[in-house]
Each structure stands twice: as structure tokens, then as C-alpha cells.
Image (spheres, rainbow, N blue to C red):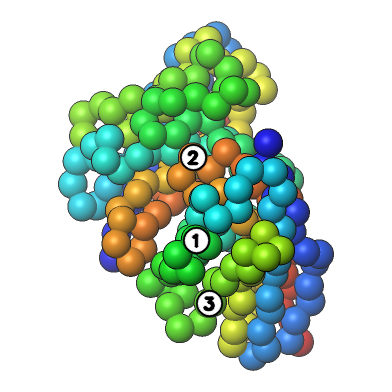
């Protein structure tokens, strides 16, 4: 069974930079996994931030960026704001019978 | 602008089934797949499956194989997710979303399984 792994929690200071990663149990994550990133705040539905590795939605703040880093998908927040405190999930595409798998999520604390 | 509107909250008994709908407006319904994602209380997001309306083909996560059925009615631009043999662990918010870029999401449907 495919497992997608994210850091369970990270802490960053306001104005700082933090990188969240997303690894696959099948090996290196490439653009062919079409990594998606989502932000979720308590009581709210997930909100899409990044699709296909690095593409932003119209509402995605410029301080969020997606990339591939060391065989993983990565979400970097530069100049973190207090409102960025949230849970972040990645989603990878595997094709075949079970196309998509979510990571377990990273709880980002801004402190 | 695609909008996905889901059916309302449900309370079900263990062993029963639930069917949640997701009506799309805007865009061309058949041109994109609809995925279903759930989130149990205090837990992460879980991809359940998807339907490609134009092909009528559905894929399911291994965990839900045999218990979930996803269908689509092109005439009403509505996708459905039916989960059977419900147990308390199926208590969750169920979301539909446009597959691919996941730009558009339904508002979520709370399904509570309780005796």
C-alpha cells in the first residue's frame, strides 16, 4: 500500500521561511506525480494552494511556492504570516486503479 | 466558474448505506472527473475515489473497494457517492472536488453513523 509522508508538525516564526515536504513510499517524487498542496484551517474545507508541483491558483498568496526538492515535493512559505497557521496536506497522483493518495498532513504553527 | 453543491447532513445506523450527491454548475460537467474525499473528526484527508463522467469509469481507493460506489448523472450534472455497510468509523465530513487541480470543492456533507 502506497504511503505519502509529511512532517507531522513544524513551527516557524512570523516573517520566517519554512519548507514542508511530501515523500512517497514508492521512491522519488517527480512532476509526474502532479503534487497538489492544500491548506486547511479548523472548521473549514480544504483550500487548494498549488497544483502540478508549482502552479498557483488565482488566490494563492505569492509567499507560497511549490517545487521538487531532494526527491520530494515541497511547499515553501516565505515571509510567514500569522494567518498561515494551519494544517497543510499534499496529494500525489499514482495513476492506475487508485490514482490519488493524500499525505498525513503537517500542522504548521506560527510562533 | 465551477460550483459544487452537496446534499445535506445525514445520520445513519451501523450497517446501513448513505448516498451523498454533488451537483455541479458552471463549466462542462463531462469534461472533468469528480473525486470524493473524506475527513473523520480530528483526522486527515482521505481520498476515496473518483468518477470520470464522460467515460462512466470510476476508480476507488483500495481501502473502500467493495463498499463505495461512485456514479454520475450527466443529464443533471450530479455525481453521487454511496458508502455501504456503515460503521462508526465512517463518521466524517465527505467532500466532492474537481479532480486534477482540485480547484473547486463542495461545501462538505457530515455523515454521522450512530446507533
Q: CA distance from mark 3 to mark 2?
A: 23 Å
Question: In the structure shown, which secondary structural element does the residue marked by tag 1 occupy?
Answer: loop
Secondary structure found at label 3: strand
Q: B82 or A42: which is nearer to us? A: B82
Q: Residue at x 52, y 14 (%)?
A: A63
Q: Mark 1 and mark 3 in contact (Cβ < 8 Å)?
A: no
Q: The residue marked by circle 1 belongs to what chain? A: B
Mark 1, residue position? B54
The residue most toward the front is B75
Q: Measure the alpha-carbon separation of dots 3 and 1.
A: 20 Å
Q: Position of residue B42 (x, y in %)?
A: 62, 55
- Residue B1 is situated, as x and y percent measured from the top left of the image, at 68, 36
Precedes in sequence: disc 3 or disc 1: 1
Sort mark 3 into few (<14), some (14-19) or many (20+) by Cα contacts within 10 Å: many
Q: Splitting the image into 4 quarters, where does residue B84 fall?
A: bottom right
Pointer 3 residue: B68
Q: Earlier in the sequence, mark 1 or mark 2?
A: 1
Give SS at disc 2: loop
- The residue under the point 44% across, 34% down is A51
Report in which chain the residue with disc 3 lies: B
The C terminus of chain A - image quarter: top right
A17 and B67: which is toward the camera: B67
Q: Residue at x 56, y 48 (%)?
A: B98
**Place of residue A54 in the rendered image (x, y in percent of width and height, measured from the top left):** 39, 25
Residue to which mark 2 is pinned: B101
**In this rendering, which labeled residue sits more in front, label 3 or label 1?**
1
Marks 1 and 2 sit apart, C-alpha to C-alpha, by 18 Å
Amino acid at each position: 500500500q502506497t504511503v505519502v509522508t509529511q512532517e507531522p508538525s513544524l513551527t516557524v516564526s512570523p516573517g520566517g521561511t519554512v519548507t514542508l515536504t511530501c515523500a512517497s513510499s514508492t521512491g522519488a517524487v517527480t512532476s509526474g506525480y502532479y503534487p497538489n498542496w492544500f491548506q486547511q484551517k479548523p472548521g473549514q474545507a480544504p483550500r487548494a494552494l498549488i497544483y502540478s508541483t508549482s502552479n498557483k491558483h488565482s488566490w494563492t498568496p505569492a509567499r507560497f511556492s511549490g517545487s521538487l526538492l531532494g526527491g520530494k515535493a515541497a511547499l515553501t512559505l516565505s515571509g510567514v504570516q500569522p494567518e498561515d497557521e494551519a494544517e497543510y496536506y499534499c496529494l500525489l497522483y499514482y495513476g492506475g486503479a487508485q490514482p490519488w493518495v493524500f499525505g498525513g498532513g503537517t500542522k504548521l504553527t506560527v510562533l | 466558474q465551477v460550483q459544487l453543491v452537496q446534499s445535506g447532513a445525514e445520520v445513519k445506523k451501523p450497517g446501513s448505506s448513505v448516498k451523498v450527491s454533488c451537483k455541479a454548475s458552471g463549466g462542462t460537467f463531462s469534461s472533468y472527473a469528480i473525486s470524493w474525499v473524506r475527513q473523520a473528526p480530528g483526522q486527515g484527508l482521505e481520498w476515496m475515489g473518483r468518477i470520470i463522467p464522460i467515460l462512466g469509469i470510476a476508480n476507488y481507493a483500495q481501502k473502500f473497494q467493495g463498499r463505495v460506489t461512485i456514479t454520475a448523472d450527466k443529464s443533471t450534472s450530479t455525481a453521487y457517492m454511496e458508502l455501504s455497510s456503515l460503521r462508526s468509523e465512517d463518521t466524517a465530513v465527505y467532500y466532492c472536488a474537481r479532480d486534477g487541480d482540485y480547484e473547486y470543492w463542495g461545501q462538505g456533507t457530515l455523515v454521522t453513523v450512530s446507533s
